[in-house]
Every structure is written in C-alpha cells, then in structure tokens.
Amino acid sequence: MLERYEPNVRLTFARNPHYFVPGLPYADGVDVTIDSDPSSRFASWVAGKYDFGPEYQQVVRRLDLDTARPRKPGLSPRSTSGSPAVTPHGSSTRSRSRTSGCAVPWAGPATGEFLEASPFSLGHGAPNATVPAAAGEWAIPIDQLTREGRELYEQDVPAAKRLLAEAGYPNGFKVPVETTAGYGPDFMDRVQIALKNWKSAGIETELKLKEFGAYIASTIFGKYDKMTFGLRGAWLDADSYLRPFLPGQPLNSSGVNDPKLSEMILLQRKTFDVAKRREIIYDIQRHIAHQAYALYDASQKVVSVWEPYVKNWGPNNGYDYGGRLMAAWLDR
C-alpha cells in the first residue's frame, strides 16, 4: 500500500496485512527512489543503495556493465526483451493515404539505428510490427509481412523520394511532429534519429515538445496536429496492441476506421484455439503494416540485474511491479 509520496524524491509502500493471498507478500515494504539523472542513478546502484538495476524495469545500461562488475562480483545479469515494447508514431487523424508520409520507405523509424544507439541494447533486439517482438509468438516476423509492409523496414531513400514525387511532393513537404522530453534523454535520441531519416527522404519536421503531463492528457488521445512520436506498450496480451485501432477507442490516436480490420480484431477475441488466433493476429499485423496506420521501432534486448540476496524474483515485461514482488524476499 502507498504509505508516503514525496514528489520528485521517493515513494514508500508498506505491506498490506489484508493481502488476498495468505502469508504474502513477504517484504515489509518497498522504497522507490525518483532520480532523473542517469549518472546519479548508476552511482547509487553501484554504491549498494538499490536492490535492483537503476533503470526502468530494473535494468542497467549495457555500457555500464563493465564498470559495475568489479564492484559487484556477485552480479548475475539476465538479458530479456523489454524496454517499452512498442514505440508507434501515428499519422494525422486527417491523413489516411499511403502518400501522407506514413508509408515512405525509411521515412519511418530507423530500427537498426535505434538499437545501435541505445545504451540499453547496443544493437541487441528486433524490429516491431504492430505486436512488438518482445511479445514472442504473437509478433509476426517482419519477413512474413506483405511486400508493402516489409518496405517500411528497408532503408531505401531513393524509393522514398520517388513515392513522394509520385504523390505530388517532388520537393518533399514540411510537417509538425509532437512529442515530449518527459521520457528522458535516451528517448529524445531516438526522436532525433527518426527526424534525421525523415529529412533524408525530403520530409522536413517542426518538432513541438509538450510537457509530459500535457502530452499524456492530449496527444496520445489523438489531440495533435499532423504527426506524433511517442512510447506505447509493455502490455502483456496481443489484443492490447490491436484494440487502439478500433473506432471509438480512446487510444485510437490516428483515427482509424477500417471495417475489415475491426472485424478481424473482434474475431481474434473470440477465437479460443491458440494456433488459429495467432494466424488471425498475424493477418491483422499484415493488414496494419500494408495500410501504414502507424510506424514502429524495435524491442530492445535489455539487461536486468538484481542483488544476489534478492530471492524468488525475476524480470518480465509489463507494469505489474506488485505482482513481481509479491513473493520476493531478501536473504540477508
């Protein structure tokens, strides 16, 4: 239970004596430190102030591992697929054609560059379709998309310029892009990579930064001008990544209204045979990629770390920290 909250400093949770599982949780409490400085977070972790990795989802930057090992001889890092599983950036709610910039080869996310530039992955990871690669068997392999869908992941600047010219934009066009710096400096590096690649294809951007609270309250619900770049994901079921494409859904930020797509999404919900449901979800991802309703970057292969005395705990995707810590205990 939340016992105390100090804005921008810490959260303190106390054990719930009436927890629905008798005898759990084992821990008497959990202290969560809020620190916006990556260097400070890392130094505190190395100094033994944290029981888990200092970054989101208890991970550590791969760049920092060699520095940490001499001071943490019992370190047992585990590589997992994680870090916000999907990073879609949608087109305008008023722009539905494949010539709007959404389907221009390599005008979209520079997946390889994202992975190489990220200090969390250093090139380890895989490109995302609508369902992120981190979701395992529910994510369609990129080579199984339609030809048009695969083109979104291929670097072909001349082809991008040719498509823009055929659409009536031989000199490219300018477009505002909304995002927030609230996700941190690593996220902003990804934004700059995307803008650089769009520019190489002829798409000039006007970056509009929103305060994080304002971004969450407006942009993710479709309240933006032309384009947005942001994080979305870490859900555990494939349907959560498909639901935002249904008309009337709050997170349908691109204003998609596609009867065929809606029919397929509803069909997979009532298909209980796992293999058949997976095939429907693969077809859904082919359809979304073909229509280019949104573009995606990659699932990073991140490194989770925790102290040797932390027992009965393991990393996984999602926001359920309570469930993960439910049966954890400290052997010290």
Image (tube, rainbow, N blue to C red):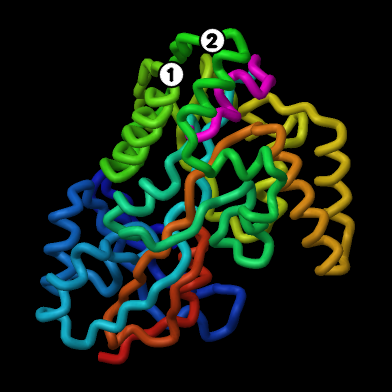
Question: Would residue 99 be counted in the magenta stretch?
Answer: yes
**CA–CA distance between discs 1 and 2?**
9 Å
Q: Is residue 216 in sight in this rendering?
A: no
Q: Secondary structure at mark 2?
A: loop
Q: Amino acid at mark 2?
A: Tyr
Q: Secondary structure at mark 1?
A: loop
Tag shown at residue 169: 2
Q: Amino acid at mark 1?
A: Gly
Residue at the (36%, 34%) spot, across then down: 191
The answer to which of marks 1 and 2 sits earlier in the sequence is 2
Q: Is residue 94 above or below residue 80?
A: above
Pick the front one: 66 or 221: 66
Which residue is tagged 1? 202
Which residues fall within the magenta stretch?
94-106
**Screen quadrant of the N terminus:** bottom left
Residue 90 position, x and y percent, is 57, 30
Residue 142 position, x and y percent, is 61, 53
Residue 297 position, x and y percent, is 48, 45
Furthest residue toward bottom: 331
Q: Is residue 260 in sight in this rendering?
A: yes
**Screen quadrant of the C terminus:** bottom left
Residue at the (44%, 78%) spot, across then down: 314
